[in-house]
Image (cartoon, helix red, strand yellow):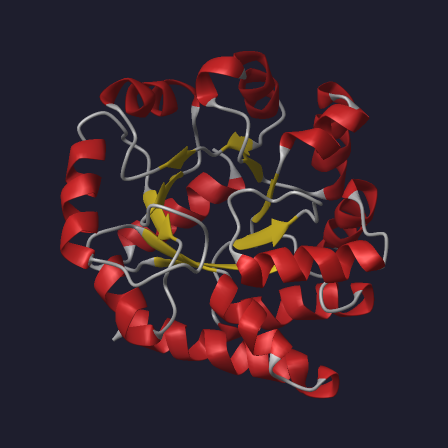
Amino acid sequence: MSRIQSTLSALAANNKKGLIPFITAGDPSPDLTVPLMHALVAGGADILELGVPFSDPMAEGPVIQRACERALKFNVGMRDVLGFVSEFRKTNTTTPVVLMGYANPIERMGQTAFILAAKAAGVDGTIVVDYPPEECEEFAATLKANDMDPIFLLAPTSTEERIQQVAKFGSGFSYYVSLKGVTGAANIDTAEVSQRIAAIRKYVKLPIGVGFGIRDAATAKAVAAVSDAVVIGSRIIQELENTPREHAVEAVQTFIAGIRKALDE
């Protein structure tokens, strides 16, 4: 059982919901990435989602696009991201870390080289936006053979066939994108999310995390009522944008602690 699977299983056994915050590696500066990761855990995060900066993040809205641009100004690349995970692992060997990004940086390294380097760094899973499940069977199998989980996105527009493909190749959890569009784009219709998750569960037996559009404690609590975990990204990046650098770590920990409190009430 992977670290992601054991974490989510333990939460379910205790009737708790998972909290999965996202930050972009290298934003607002490389030296803050690992302190921010630890702050998120201290605030109550169960799994960390670490964005790999990319020049054309097609699934991301303006907020995370800006985060990628800031990180890329520091020339933060895949090997730097793996370095952040290695540094984090020196003092935290239990919290799962998922890398979220795009195919290009992985292809530049080579899939096998990336998987081996990710395993060595302490990565637990990947979300690769432009690796559809039906086209990356070998990548998914190699990840699983190295105790990492290939996590796939499902959307309001996902067909029954795509849902079945995710059920076949995915592991760890499935990530349901609650909105049509990019990250941070609009408000969530929790009734619609509930209906879609019920349809997905006919095929997908993994825990389901919901992201895109969760901006506050009330929404997180409502979404958690119909899912297994909530993913929050753009709102955390906004917190970083609106906070002086010297207070960034504290602000992020305080914000995520508020979400944790709401989920546990």
Q: Residue 124: image x %, image y %? A: 59, 40
Q: Residue 100: image x %, image y %? A: 58, 44
Q: Residue at x 44, y 33 (%)?
A: 152
Q: Residue at x 73, y 20 (%)?
A: 112
Above or below, comparing residue 3 to residue 169 in the picture: below
Q: Residue 167: image x %, image y %? A: 33, 23
Decide which of 130, 50 is in the foreground and name it. Answer: 130
Decide which of 240, 91 is in the foreground and name it. Answer: 240
In the rendered view, does 21 fall on the left or right side of 180?
A: right
Above or below, comparing residue 240 to residue 196 in the picture: below
The quadrant where residue 31 appears: bottom right
The quadrant where residue 213 appears: bottom left
Decide which of 205, 30 is in the foreground and name it. Answer: 30
Q: Residue at x 29, y 60 (%)?
A: 16
The quarter of the picture where the C terminus appears is bottom left
Decide which of 194, 59 is in the foreground and name it. Answer: 59
In the rendered view, does 191 fall on the left or right side of 50?
A: left
Residue 201 in view (yes/no): no
The quadrant where residue 101 appears: top right
In the rendered view, does 254 fall on the left or right side of 225?
A: right
Above or below, comparing residue 163 to residue 190 in the picture: above
Q: Residue 243: image x %, image y %? A: 63, 84
View extreme (right): residue? 75
